[in-house]
Image (cartoon, rainbow, N blue to C red):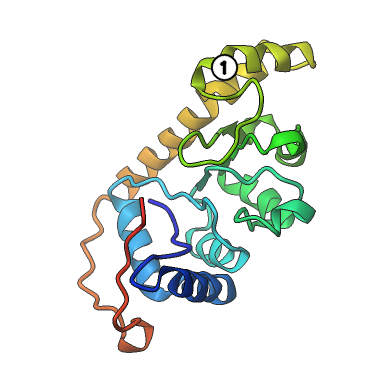
Amino acid sequence: MTEPYSVNGKSSRKITWTLHNYYMLFGVISISLIAICIGLAVGILLSSRRSSDPAVQTVHNVLQQYPLIDGHNDLPWQYRQYAKNKVADDWLRDQNKSGSKRGLSDFGKIISNYITDLMGIGYVGIGFDFDGVPSYTTGLEDVSKYPELFTELHRQGWTPDELQKLAGENFIRVFRKVEKIKQQLREIQPYEDVMPENETVPDRNCYTSF
């Protein structure tokens, strides 16, 4: 499950801009927090992909030691603040405590070991976009190029143990922790809360354009 950052409707550009900025300014609304808490008890893995600082901060404060997973937040902040990967470096460091994992994107010439250096090899994985993107990094056009990527990383000094963590061991560690938390929360009963009227957005359809 991922934290939302935009919706599309009859006036998709206007709605996307309005709600995107709402989440950027105020983070996650209470009904979303309820959904997140319900998800913990059934083993749903939460993704903070493309979420703003306020949204990630709110979820992190509520969940504490619950790990998050992030599709791609690997750019230096001076670049990331202009993209949709809007999570500041301080929050990336802080989320190490909960065992969260970051996926690395293939953002052209900017891709580097930035996040690995910031968080440590035990907290990164691969999170490339291959669908609906206008361009690809040469040599990383699809998943068939992964062997070449790992060969290059090995040439740059990555050890076999580090490459195994990047390839999937870090994902597995997060999955196991989520499953453990699910077992700890199995006695929690479902919520029957209704979204407060002041948090509803009238006449807006929340669906993607894909």
Residue at 73 percent across and 56 percent down: it is 90
Q: Quadrant of residue 188?
A: bottom left
Q: Is residue 151 left or right of residue 31?
A: right
Residue at 66 percent across and 24 percent down: it is 138
Q: Is residue 185 left or right of residue 138?
A: left
Q: Is residue 84 left or right of residue 29?
A: right
Q: Height in image: 145 above or below 56?
A: above
Label 1 element class: helix
Residue at 63 percent across and 12 percent down: it is 148
Residue at 53 percent across and 57 percent down: it is 64
Residue 101: where, in percent of width, then height? Answer: 57, 40
Residue 197: where, in percent of width, then height? Answer: 30, 88
Circle 1 residue: 145
Residue 131: where, in percent of width, then height? Answer: 46, 37
Residue kind at label 1, given as amino acid type: Lys
Q: Height in image: 210 above or below 139?
A: below
